[in-house]
Image (cartoon, coloured by chain):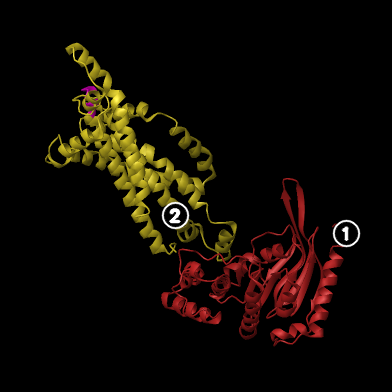
Chain colours: A yellow, B red
Amino acid sequence: MNRVLPILVVLAAILALWYVAVVPMNAGWTIAQAERAGHELTFVDIVADTMNQDRPRLPAPHQVAAELKKTVLDTKVTSKRSLVFHGWITLQSTLWGFALGTTVGIGMAVSIVYSRTANMSLMPWAIISQTIPIVAIAPMIIVVLATLGVEGRTVPKAIISAYLCFFPVLVSMVKGLRSPGAMQIDLMKTYSANAGQTFWKLRLPASVPYLFTSLKVGIAAALVGTIVGELPTGAIQGLGARILIGDQFGNPLMIWSALIAAACLAGALVTIVTVLQSLALQRMGYAR
Amino acid sequence: MSQAAAIEAKNLDLTFETGDGSIQALQDVTLEIGKGEFVSFIGPSGCGKTTFLRVVAGLETPTGGEVRVNGTSPDEARRDRAYGYVFQEAGLYPWRTIAGNVRLPLEIMGYSKSEMADRVNRVLELVELSGFENKHPWQLSGGMQQRASIARALAFDADILLMDEPFGALDEIVRDHLNEQLLGLWDHTGKTIGFVTHSIPEAVYLSTRIVVMSPRPGRITDIIDNPLPRKRPLDIRDTPEFLEVAQRIRKGLRAGQSYGD
């Protein structure tokens, strides 16, 4: 309860702010309509109308909730109108991207920790890679992959997702693999341990807490990467595609419900990683 | 050099090159430690006592002179599992149980499963930690953790135990207890022990010989044969013989500081 209460308070504050913002955002249209029809409007009329427009600039929370209910609960999950269907498309790419990004991140971290050359050559490029807007690279990745004969959207989206996700894993793993102190390394030397033994018995287990912290950031980044990957690529399926289509067809309810769905998905993914983290650390004996 | 010596150092020099010049950590250190001796190294920070131990372990390479461990080079001696090293911090792996930590060197050295289990049991009994096999390090006190790290160093039956201020971070009461235990362990295992310390009473209570060192450059200023008997109850520290040795160490330390500071 002590952990849930602050979250609920913040949520309530956001909802209150949202409702307040709905009035000025949508009032222009209400007033213009009334003027054209020659009606006089009281303040209460204006407020009531801004809450229930068909194509509001900013939909009210209860409108988004109704849209979510319609597209999540009342629609068959196999339908192209179902948010569950689109969420599943996005989730698949996210998980592939997460797996790929994590593998690349860990692999690069190991080579950076063990090779001076890799440290000097890879690390600057890894940092530069994160300064390039992903939206600029996404179309190129799709064109290149299409030329190579890769069909469908899943692979390019997963690569774009991995592009965002590998970096936090790389940075944390470099730190984690380097976390054993001089004394720990000396101790392994007194046993005449070889490089492999030092890696498997010391560096790798020592890096696990760092790894899990970065996985939480990484899975959220992978989801963002997938959604961004769905925007400029002409995709018609996935939460990102719903946002784009909602924008093109002037349907803010579609955008907002896709946004909320994406946020819920991110929350669920981070929660799963957090649970795995506490299970793993407990098993390893870190927990107190 | 004689065959019976566990550790022999002859005219050992070691100079570290640092950003602001070179530091002479060891200068002309000559010392012979016989098998079964308990030798303490005492002196202020920077006198080279830890460096000497690290040279013996092959963790530092001397810039001059010669060092032999069991008649071979430090690197060969390490491959022969001639010594176990105990650091100031216990340095147990938090992700391994106490038994798992003691098993670590045995895994690396490739012992069989049953042999590992035997040895772990035996050394944990030796340091009075039986029953704590499945605990994790954070569940143990600092003194118990250090005992586990001693068990880890003993697990592969090295003849020589190199201890670098192993009890430096512990409080006086725990330290007394561990000193007593260590002395008992040395008495019935017959190991050769090289022991670095800051504490004069600890050095006198434990050792058969005490090497007094002084800094800038790190060198030996005095080597004292301890006349105390092999069996030493804790209250031997109030006897005149004990105080006499302590006084001589103090004098040696003061003489080493006569120039410089």
In terms of secondary structure, where does tag 2 sit?
A: helix
Q: Is residue A249 on the magenta stretch? A: yes
Q: Chain of mark 1?
A: B
Amino acid type at image mark 2: Pro
Q: Residue at x 19, y 41 (%)?
A: A84
Q: Residue at x 20, y 25 (%)?
A: A53
Question: Residue A280: horizontal and vertical position, in percent?
Answer: 37, 59
Nearest the viewer among A39 and A10 is: A39
Residue A235 makes an appearance in the image: no
Residue at mark 1 to residue at mark 2: CA–CA distance: 50 Å
Left/right placement of residue B110 relative to residue A231 reads right
Q: Which residues are magenta?
A: A246-252
Q: Chain of mark 2?
A: A
Q: Contact, CB < 8 Å: mark 1 with mark 2?
A: no
Nearest the viewer among B59 and B93 is: B93
Left/right placement of residue A219 relative to residue A89 reads right
Question: Residue B218: horizontal and vertical position, in percent?
Answer: 78, 61
Left/right placement of residue B90 relative to residue A160 reads right
Amino acid type at image mark 1: Tyr
Q: Quadrant of residue A244?
A: top left
